[in-house]
Amino acid sequence: MISSTTATGLNLSRFGPIGLVVVQSTSLCNLDCSYCYLPDRQKKRVFDLDMLPLLMQRILESPYAGPEFSLVWHAGEPLTLPTSWYDQATEIIYRSLDRFGAQDIQFDQHVQTNATLINDAWCDCFHRNRLIVGISVDGPEDIHDAHRRFRNGRGSHALAMKGIETLHRNDVHFHCISVLTAEAMEQPERMYRFFRDHGINDVGFNVEEQEGINTSSSMQGADMEAKYRDFLRAFWRLSEQDGYPVILREFDQVISLIQGNQRMTQNELNRPFSILSVDSQGNFSTFDPELLSVASDRYGSFNLGNIRDLSLLDSTQTPRFRQLMDDMNAGVDRCHDGCEYFGLCGGGNGSNKFWEHGTLASSETNACRFGTQIPVQVLLERFEEGPPLQQPAINQAV
């Protein structure tokens, strides 16, 4: 555990270690999803690989470096770049680890993709660079294509499924993020069977959120909360009856905490420099990746600086960082003092607090009701009936 203190009195034992680095390899996305929070996804800005050794240096020289971290290429569609870009990036990363004597650090590399561009060449790239693959698909065609469309209005489901079939054919394991919107709430059996029948067995539900340029969500209100509760109950029971061919991220962590009699006191989304996010221009932030490059009246930019100009440690010596950290801590304290679910979430997600309440110094959000409270309620109901079958453990990624 880091134990030093900065000149301004910050206790670094409350920072890091960096476990997740989210890097925007490109801002461009070939889709125009209706619920996307990114404002510049039509612009092709590319992370300059000449900056990558410097990024690695910033991580490894900092007091927040830990024994392991994951790097995720995300925020845009990474596969709009050529496979050779990731070959070069991987070579640079491992050369940097050697240069800094960090060969013993446990490192893995991920890519989060909409799957529409996946072909055999990409699967070869995933294998040779040991890239862990996350895909985004929202369920059956009509549900998926209601929101995940190309700019010409054409749905993306057919190409996404072709990409998923290619992953299976090339023995590339993958996990899935599925954004849940109102269209899915009446169809838990159909959603479950979609994932089961297509061999998508590692799934995380992201309930549509109010964030960024997506200023409203179809998943709001008491009626929708009740529908989501029923949806999760039905989905869980279907998977339990089949022996868990589909494992849900929403339940995995809660089960491990409950069965291990453990509780959270904080989480990586509100602990500074547990996560480092870097955009395609080298600007960086911490806390939630969804805050990267966001501008606000209250805080100005959430960016702390640019890796070309500023070390991670020096970025914490600014009034901007102090305000962000003070408000984030105040929000976590409010959650701790007023929410019975605190031990199962660790104080919530700052970006949701900001987008819903206008400040990090706030507590309960629509996102935490859907993301934590309702899944916990559904699980506890099931435990009251008797211990459920144990769903297999899964390795999670962004």
Image: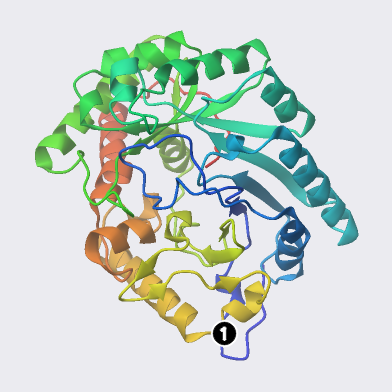
Q: Pick whichever, 123 or 46, lies toward us.
A: 46
Q: Position of residue 376 (x, y in %)?
A: 31, 39
State whether residue 234 is above or below residue 2: above
* Quarter of the view holding residue 65: bottom right
Q: How is the image coloured?
A: rainbow
Q: Is residue 240 visible?
A: no
Residue at coordinates 60% horizontally, 76% vertically from top-left? 12
* Quarter of the view holding residue 58: bottom right
Q: Position of residue 271 (x, y in %)?
A: 50, 64
Q: Position of residue 132 (x, y in %)?
A: 65, 33
Q: Looking at the rendering, in which quadrant would you find the N terminus?
A: bottom right
Q: Position of residue 200 (x, y in %)?
A: 49, 18
Residue at coordinates 28% horizontally, 68% vertically from top-left? 334
Report whether 208 appears left or right of 87.
Answer: left
Q: Is residue 356 visible?
A: yes
Residue at the spot of label 1: 317
